[in-house]
Image: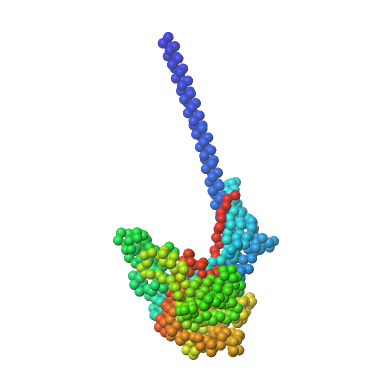
């Protein structure tokens, strides 16, 4: 009996062990299957991710290639363009497109194929939206992505500077102060220690023969000196409170919270002065927008309802045909609202209120001070920069954009020409390409072998037009009579303040007193002669993302932007 009992227990143990082994094997099998499945899923997901990246890589390639191809067409030989330039994208849908689809590409991880689905008009803006489908394939797995890419306009980057010259830049004189960055599309010459509270940029340009060099030196204020001496119209400091971030590590360390608000008060877009002045030579030129056909700006002026009002009377409703004289007083200022176009000359001085830009079909003549009724202010120190930005949003702003020249002072007087004349003709100036639409203002002096029009650079010559009295007109003169210009001009010694952002395709020139310009200068050639001081206070509102599209300054081609990604 004992033997049988032992035999029975032995059988039971064997059965139990067998069952246990079967269970273990089963569990391991399940785990193995799951692991195999998980591995397969992981491999598949990795292939999907690779295919997705390939699809996006295809989109990025085509986005960039379309931009480069269109950019060459958009700017052409002179940089001029019209609203109809964007019809280039419509031709992508034709039998003979300027850029061919589909686009195939290969990378180490797989392939992509990009197809054009559609080209759409922008409902409320100039430009086009290009719809693309890109399919990426990696190890037999495919993923398709559809994207909508916007090609349009934005405020030109030339307005990021207190002084931008589309030629050789020059600051000659210890009386010059620029509270802002300065830049040229050629070499930059600094003589007699001008003060630049900002950076200096020079560019390499084979057409100008420039090497991108910065000749000479400038002085600049320390941040503490800037806070103590810079005017309220000068751009803010960064940080906005002088005793914050003493060690410059970007953090609010113990003992640095001078205003007690618990934060480091800096400007998000770094447009404040940080106490340094760095030279950047050998830069790439910045494309300067060219005011060719003003049709685009006429359309914008009409769509935006731009107006100039004086004494309760609307002088300009969108577009004004002819020459316009604007003189503002304390009791009757010039009121501007949005962009407007004046097809002839603009003669202006006095008090200004509102926000907008005046586009002149020929010259802008500033014959006295231009002063805002409600100017912006940047207190130093500033305990609340966000509130300052918000407050300045509603302050006055005037842009003066000329298809011809911007001329300051009474050019009918001998001293004006003696001071400026030699700087408005070769060898100080040089010949350059212009737009065919400049022929109406006499700027087409000759054509090159490729048929491109050129101006010889002599602004003191006659332009082929006449003044109102039938006398011949020079490039720097207005179409009004010399007698009238002299009768309304202030003495050059009394021209001490100009509140405006000045832009011109050609030259800005003038004879002035001790001038402070609150805004900026963008021009090809510059010849401003002053008594002893010239101060440029950059209006940072045109660079701040919150404000810059509000003022309707001259537009330029924007980098393309992907509006929507959608995976099919």
- Indicate whether 32 appears above or below 89: above
Looking at the image, which is closer to me, 509 or 349? Answer: 349
Residue at the left extreme of this rendering: 255
Query: Which residue is pictured at 49% across the width and 83% down the height?
Result: 367
Query: Which residue is pictured at 48% across the width and 69% down the height?
Result: 542
- Left or right position of 391 against 89: left
Quadrant of image for the N terminus: top left
Is residue 212 among what the camera can see?
A: no
Looking at the image, which is closer to me, 285 or 180? Answer: 180
Is residue 466 among what the camera can see?
A: yes
Q: Position of residue 191 (x, y in %)?
A: 41, 79
What colour scheme has been applied to the protein in the rendered image?
Answer: rainbow
Residue at the right extreme of this rendering: 95
Query: Which residue is pictured at 64% across the width and 58% down the height?
Result: 118
- Left or right position of 170 against 134: left
Q: Position of residue 188 (x, y in %)?
A: 46, 76
Q: Position of residue 335 (x, y in %)?
A: 51, 75
Looking at the image, which is closer to me, 414 or 483? Answer: 483
Looking at the image, which is closer to me, 455 or 377? Answer: 377
Q: Where is residue 298 in the image (x, y as percent from the top left)?
A: 59, 72
Query: Which residue is pictured at 56% across the width and 50% down the height?
Result: 52
Total numbered circles: 0
Quadrant housing residue 294: bottom right
Residue at the top extreme of this rendering: 1
- Indicate whether 13 appears above or below 97: above
């Amino acid at each position: 009996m004992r033997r049988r009992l032992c035999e029975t227990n032995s059988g039971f143990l064997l059965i139990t062990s067998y069952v246990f082994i079967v269970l273990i094997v089963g569990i391991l099998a399940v785990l193995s299957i799951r692991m195999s499945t998980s591995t397969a899923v992981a491999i598949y997901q990795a292939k999907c991710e690779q295919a997705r990246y390939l699809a996006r890589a295809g989109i990025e390639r085509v986005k960039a290639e379309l931009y480069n191809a269109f950019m060459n067409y958009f700017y052409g030989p002179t940089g001029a363009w019209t609203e109809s330039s964007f019809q280039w994208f419509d031709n992508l849908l034709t039998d003979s497109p300027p850029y061919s689809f589909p686009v195939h590409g290969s990378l180490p991880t797989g392939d992509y194929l990009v197809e054009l689905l559609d080209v759409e008009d922008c409902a409320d803006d100039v430009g086009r939206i290009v719809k693309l489908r890109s399919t990426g394939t990696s190890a037999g797995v495919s993923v398709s992505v559809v994207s909508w890419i916007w090609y349009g306009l934005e405020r030109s980057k030339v307005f990021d500077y207190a002084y931008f010259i589309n030629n050789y830049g020059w600051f000659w004189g210890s009386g010059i102060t620029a509270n802002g960055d300065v830049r040229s599309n050629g070499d930059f010459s600094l003589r007699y220690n001008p003060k630049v509270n900002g950076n200096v940029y020079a560019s390499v340009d084979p057409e100008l023969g420039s090497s991108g060099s910065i000749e000479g030196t400038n002085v600049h204020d320390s941040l503490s000196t800037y806070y103590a001496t810079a005017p309220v119209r000068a751009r803010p400091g960064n940080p906005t409170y002088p005793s914050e971030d003493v060690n410059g590590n970007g953090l609010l360390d113990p003992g640095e919270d001078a205003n007690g608000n618990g934060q480091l008060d800096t400007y998000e877009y770094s447009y404040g002065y940080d106490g340094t002045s760095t030279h950047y030579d050998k830069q790439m030129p910045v494309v300067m927008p060219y005011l060719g056909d003003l049709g685009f700006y006429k359309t914008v002026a009409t769509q935006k309802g731009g107006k100039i009002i004086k004494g309760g009377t609307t002088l300009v409703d969108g577009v004004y045909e002819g020459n316009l004289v604007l003189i503002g007083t304390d009791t009757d200022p010039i009121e501007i609202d949005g962009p407007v176009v004046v097809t002839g000359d603009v003669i202006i001085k006095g008090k200004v209120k509102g926000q907008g830009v005046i586009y002149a079909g020929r010259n802008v003549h500033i014959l006295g001070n231009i002063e805002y009724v409600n100017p912006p202010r940047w207190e130093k120190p500033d305990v609340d920069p966000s509130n300052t930005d918000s407050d300045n949003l509603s302050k006055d702003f005037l842009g003066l954009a000329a298809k011809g020249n911007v001329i300051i002072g009474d050019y009918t007087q001998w001293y004006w020409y003696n001071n400026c004349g030699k700087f408005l003709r070769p060898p100080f100036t040089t010949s350059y390409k212009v737009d065919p639409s400049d022929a109406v203002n006499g700027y087409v002096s000759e054509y090159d072998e490729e048929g491109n029009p050129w101006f010889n650079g002599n602004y003191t010559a006659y332009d082929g037009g006449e003044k109102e009295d039938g006398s011949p007109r020079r490039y720097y003169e207005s179409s009004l009579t010399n007698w009238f210009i002299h009768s309304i001009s202030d003495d050059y010694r009394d021209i001490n303040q100009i509140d405006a952002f000045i832009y011109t395709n050609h030259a800005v020139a003038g004879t002035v007193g001790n001038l402070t310009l609150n805004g900026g200068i963008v021009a090809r050639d510059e010849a401003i002669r002053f008594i002893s001081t010239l101060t440029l206070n950059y209006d940072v509102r045109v660079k701040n993302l919150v404000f810059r599209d509000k003022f309707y300054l001259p537009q330029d081609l924007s980098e393309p932007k992907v509006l929507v990604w959608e995976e099919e």
